[in-house]
Image (cartoon, rainbow, N blue to C red):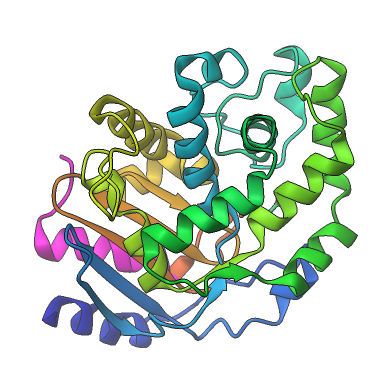
Amino acid sequence: MPVLEQIAVEIAAAPGRGTPADYIPALATTDPRQFGMAVAELDGTVYGVGDWETPFSAQSITKVFTLALCLSMEGEGLWEHVGREPSGNPFNSLVQLEYENGIPRNPFINAGALVVTDRLHSLTGDASGTLRDFLRVESGNPDLDFDEQVWASETANGDRNAALAHFMASYHNIANPVPVLLDEYFHQCAIEASCADLARAAGFLARHGIGAEGDILLTRSQAKQINAVMLTCGTYDAAGDFAYRVGLPGKSGVGGGIIAVVPGHCTLCVWGPGLDERGNSVSGVAALDRFTTLTGLSVF
Ligand code: GLU
């Protein structure tokens, strides 16, 4: 795809790459000069450029997939436990939770993702295993797995997430014991996957809920709902700027990856480990901005 080659050349020449996340020590040493980008068509055909086949830490990108699993199993009842409004606060903030009685603003901030993982664990008995198996099928990569080093690093530095979980448990919005939930959540965050894997795995969001094997994972309406929450809440407290620049539903993670969806057309995943001050990949946002500008593909 010539447009991907052009973007890679522009990204290589751009000054400033941001800084890898260092609050999870295992991520801090990732080389910020790496860059990959993949586009998956609706039939799963993938095109890529740069480090598009290099596995990286998916982190919060996985929140999209646990939300999809939970919504497909639980339906609308999920929204009694987590909202769907942008938070305007950092992803790991405790502030809003107290005056909103332990109901997180949305499923893509850490508090909201903890609620979703807790519910998925109650529904399946194995939230992280269910997620991994789902991603293996949807990506077509049977080797996709957790990075145990990242899991251990998060576990050793998990006080903030533990505080969020305990706080919500005090409002009875967490059903499982907090240590069990945290272990599931840290495994979820430690999924390792490439741009090719994640672009393919997100394909059901472009296919209006249809999975890689033709099965109905979500109703058309649920796929629309997840895309909408990605657009409004998917890129931390910079979702407005991301929508302005990129014009697509997207979800970022502190590993430097971002997935984006062009409904009815294709899915994308970009990866550049250097983050801006809000936690989004500098080269990733720039690459998606250029992609929608050069191709005219956006939801607007
Ligand atoms: N594992 C990270 C955390 O819970 C995920 C954050 C992110 O990627 O936004 O802090």
Q: Is residue 198 visible?
A: yes
Q: Is residue 34 above or below residue 173?
A: below
Per the image, is 184 magenta?
Answer: no
Magenta segment: 283-300
Q: Is residue 167 above or below residue 215?
A: above
Which residue is depicted at the point 39% across and 79% down? 36
The reply, left or right, for residue 99 in relation to residue 246 is right
Per the image, is 292 magenta?
Answer: yes
Q: Is residue 195 above or below residue 8?
A: above
Which residue is depicted at the point 63% across and 37% down? 124
The reply, left or right, for residue 105 in relation to residue 38 is right
Which residue is depicted at the point 65% across and 24% down? 104
Task: Quarter of the image for the N terminus: give it.
Answer: bottom left
The reply, left or right, for residue 125 in relation to residue 170 is left
Image x and y of residue 136, in percent: 46, 63
Q: Main secondary structure of the magenta part?
A: helix
The reply, left or right, for residue 127 in relation to residue 18 is right
Q: Quadrant of residue 223?
A: top left
Image x and y of residue 86, in percent: 50, 29
Image x and y of residue 263, in percent: 20, 44
Decide which of 167, 187 is in the foreground and name it: 187
Task: Quarter of the image for the C terminus: give it.
Answer: top left
Image x and y of residue 102, in percent: 74, 18
Which residue is depicted at the point 50% across and 76% down? 17
Decide which of 295, 60 is in the foreground and name it: 60
